[in-house]
Amino acid sequence: MTFPDIDTPAVLVDLDIAEANIDRFQAHCDEYGLKLRPHIKTHKLPRLAQRQIQAGAIGITCQKVSEAEAMISEGGIEDVLITFNIFGADKLSRLKKLAQKVRLSVVADNVATIDGLAGTFCDADVPLTILVECDTGGARCGVTTSEAAAELAAYIDGQSGLMFGGLMTYPPTGQEPAVQDWLTKAKKMIETSGVSVPIISNGGSPGMWQAQDVPVATEYRIGTYVYNDRSLQDRGVCTWDDCALSVLVTVISVPSAGRAVVDAGTKVLTSDLLGLDGHGHVLGRPDIKVAGLSEEHGVLTADDINLNVGDRLRIIPNHVCVVSNMLDEVQLIRGGTALGASPVVARGKVW
Amino acid sequence: MTFPDIDTPAVLVDLDIAEANIDRFQAHCDEYGLKLRPHIKTHKLPRLAQRQIQAGAIGITCQKVSEAEAMISEGGIEDVLITFNIFGADKLSRLKKLAQKVRLSVVADNVATIDGLAGTFCDADVPLTILVECDTGGARCGVTTSEAAAELAAYIDGQSGLMFGGLMTYPPTGQEPAVQDWLTKAKKMIETSGVSVPIISNGGSPGMWQAQDVPVATEYRIGTYVYNDRSLQDRGVCTWDDCALSVLVTVISVPSAGRAVVDAGTKVLTSDLLGLDGHGHVLGRPDIKVAGLSEEHGVLTADDINLNVGDRLRIIPNHVCVVSNMLDEVQLIRGGTALGASPVVARGKVW
């Protein structure tokens, strides 16, 4: 299906596949008694956040205050975790407004961030829940030792207006036993000091089918699973049939027998490689390599490219979350029929 | 200058530097008698397109019809070359409307594209000018032989509503003699058949200071030069002081003595490497490596990172054109003072 009435390049979202993905992983979490808190960064669409909640998710995850604002105002979402150190007067002021509307929690991995939150929420009617972010091997944010986690837990526990909620990690892939050990040790250390640890939030699509292998975790955060992509197919996490988002392109040049050029480059597919060779998978043409991208051109190569100018193709991107962020709208598909464009409400929300 | 009143992450555009860049390369083209046709893909701002015209540019270059629409309607630009094979009913219809407003030219490298243009413009009052795109080594679009260029020139010349305007190439970098030979041979072959070749359009920022080394070219297209970036600094094309665009970020975590995390990732800086190691240059801190990006996090490493949560930094991105495309607005700076936000009018215009 290449939807001749849709101008290209276009980002297509197959709602049937997305909803099946939502339901399949919700069932997996239900089976293991794990709460699910999907990350909206992948779809950025209120309607899919609502669908995730309807399927059984306890709330959503956002990375930025502006994403939470969009999901609350346009999606009516009532429980949001923001997994980012929030710093600065403007963001804190906006965060406080959101906390008056919904059940809100955030993370922190340092005293300066906690001090900013404490200064903002010291007079709040309802305390703000803070999870301590833990670096269990991902080497991004997070305290690097369980001792540091326990220190921050005690520090949060001592602030009026704040409530220590537990631990959060964005784990390294495929190291579930180490993550389990790390979080268990930190939990025990905090509990020994008399502070309870009600929430332990783990997450990430690459390890989704092993979510239960970190049983100390109470909830799982996950984004990419709603659409899936070439990186997850490559890891064996999904099949091509589970990929809900594709980029519809038109062949605009066939300079040689082994090369064609399509009308989408990094401004749609992005340069994200995620360790893969090439920039996407052409549905139905596994012999084609998406060999190179410039901003508006995608160069396809094959031994025999066998394409004509005007042909339409669909490409599964390497990394679907960043593709969602490139265009102001996606084209929704259901039952093989195009339903029209839908604005990507949380696109470009980096504040 | 880290502009405490601007919320981060933010894309800063220093107008003093951008205008100096515009004037410097215009003077270079004037010295060599080369017409300049800047590509708006880098800034996507009508005000800078206007400034380029005021400095002496003969018109602008766009990659897509929607970019041209934005620059014509919001910038009042009167001469536009679209360097893309335009295909499909919707785009052709919009192109025809633009041709009724301004002096418009496009490129083509194949018969199917020319047939689409001919079908659209056969009854036009003013014929549409078409340049034949030539692959002089860049291996993207373009006819691959001078014979093929001559064939397409004759084909265009035979269509009512179309006018053959000459040749266009996006050349390989550092191969000026080969590009000169390619274009000269094609020009002679076309002229031998009795068709004149008034325009030969060459371009690209990496080879900007060698633009005169392809003397058969009549005009030069260039985008990145207006802002410059780490890739051009690395090639010796500019200095850090010539970089007009920077990304203002805040340190949000300092997990260890050798690592800090800032609040901008691929959603601002993008994954474009352009062959470089790392994802940007931190102004004033050449010892820091922008070692890794995820969507909202930038991981900085150094032997001694010596940063605190809340510190502000400015990062020169690897590739400035794609950064311009990420946020809906940029923050304009002049004389060291922030002037406020300006919408990136042609952002996300991929159609």
Image: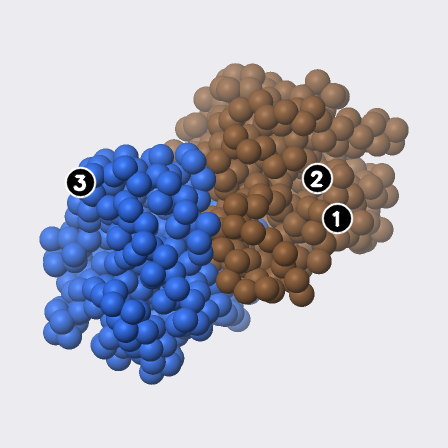
Chain colours: A blue, B brown
Discs 1 and 3 lie in a common subunit? no
Q: Which residue is mark 3?
A: A76
- Residue at (69% x, 30% y) in the render: B18
Q: Is residue B25 above or below residue A321?
A: above
Q: Is residue B204 above or below residue B235?
A: above
Q: Which mark lies nearer to you, 1 or 3?
A: 3
Q: Residue at x 75, y 32 (%)?
A: B21
Helix, strand or loop for disc 3: loop
Crowd band around label 1 with a 10 angstrom C-alpha radius: few (<14), some (14–19), many (20+): some
Query: Is the residue under label 3 in contact with that under label 2 (CB below 8 Å)?
Result: no
The residue pinned by badge 2 equals: B243
Circle 2/circle 1 CB separation < 8 Å = yes
Q: Amino acid at mark 2?
A: Cys
Q: Amino acid at mark 1?
A: Gln
The image quadrant where one finds the N terminus of chain B is top right
**Residue at 20%, 43% in the rendered image:** A126
Of residue B263 and residue A181, the one placed in the foreground of this image is A181
Q: Please report contact status of discs 1 and 3: CB closer than 8 Å, yes or no.
A: no
Per the image, the residue denoted by label 1 is B233
- Asked if residue B200 is positioned above or below residue B47 in the image, the reply reads below
